[in-house]
Amino acid sequence: MKTPILFKNVSSLLSVMFLAVFLFTAIRCSPPPPEPPVDDSYKKKLITHEEAKVLFDEYSATNNKVLMESRNGNPDSRWYWFSIEEIEGYIKYVKENAQEKNLKDVGIRIYMGKYPANHPVNKMAKPEYAGYQTVFLMPTAKKSQDSTNSMQKRRGMITDENEDVKEIQPMNMMNLSPPPNSMTNTMN
């Protein structure tokens, strides 16, 4: 009786099978690549709670005072809140889209805004926010050479080297504190 060709060299077959199983297991079980380190330049920009209170009090005595006068004494929103998960998700969204578009020096600009009294309810976190100021996050990237007029540069008229990225959506619809809960004169 003849031995089938596959079984003539059993040790070779077992070696190939063992190697295949080992490689499959090793590849499948390898940990994901490590995330790049987080830039710690933010540490130079941290302020104390006392310094934050100075900024809050100055805003209360100046800008907010003008806003209240224009609102016939009614206060406006004073703080805005996004969860850490929302911010992280938005940063990831901006980074991925910026990478696809080969954008450089990507950042996020915070703009002040105000909901019109007739603003669509589904475009605010809560319907009672209509008529109050808000903030929204706008992705930015380094200006391209052709979008910056060299004459303006030479005259020193361009101070911001970044521009809004209109191909990536801004973010809004956070929680804010409309009156009467707005802490108009104090900060915790």
Image (cartoon, rainbow, N blue to C red):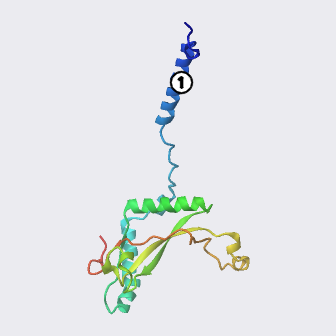
Q: Say what secondary structure mark 1 lies in.
A: helix
Asked if residue 69 is positioned above or below residue 5 in the image, the reply reads below
Q: Find disc 1 in the rendering and name its residue.
A: 19
Q: Residue furthest left?
A: 180
The answer to whether residue 95 shows anywhere in this view is yes
In screen coordinates, is 132 left or right of 109?
left
Q: Position of residue 62 (x, y in %)?
A: 40, 84
In screen coordinates, is 161 left or right of 32?
right
Q: Position of residue 95 (x, y in %)?
A: 53, 59
The answer to whether residue 184 shows anywhere in this view is no
Asked if residue 37 is positioned above or below residue 113 in the image, the reply reads above
* Label 1, residues with CA under 10 Å away: few <14, some 14-19, many ≥20: few
Q: Which corner quadrant of the image does residue 54 belong to?
A: bottom left
Q: Position of residue 76 (x, y in %)?
A: 34, 83
Q: Residue at x 43, y 75 (%)?
A: 135
Q: Which corner quadrant of the image does residue 146 belong to?
A: bottom right
Is 179 or 164 nearer to us in this picture? 164
Asked if residue 37 is positioned above or below residue 3 in the image, the reply reads below
Q: Quadrant of the C terminus?
A: bottom left
Q: Residue furthest top?
A: 1
Asked if residue 84 is positioned above or below residue 3 in the image, the reply reads below
Q: Position of residue 4 (x, y in %)?
A: 56, 14
What amino acid is labelled 1 in the image?
Answer: Leu
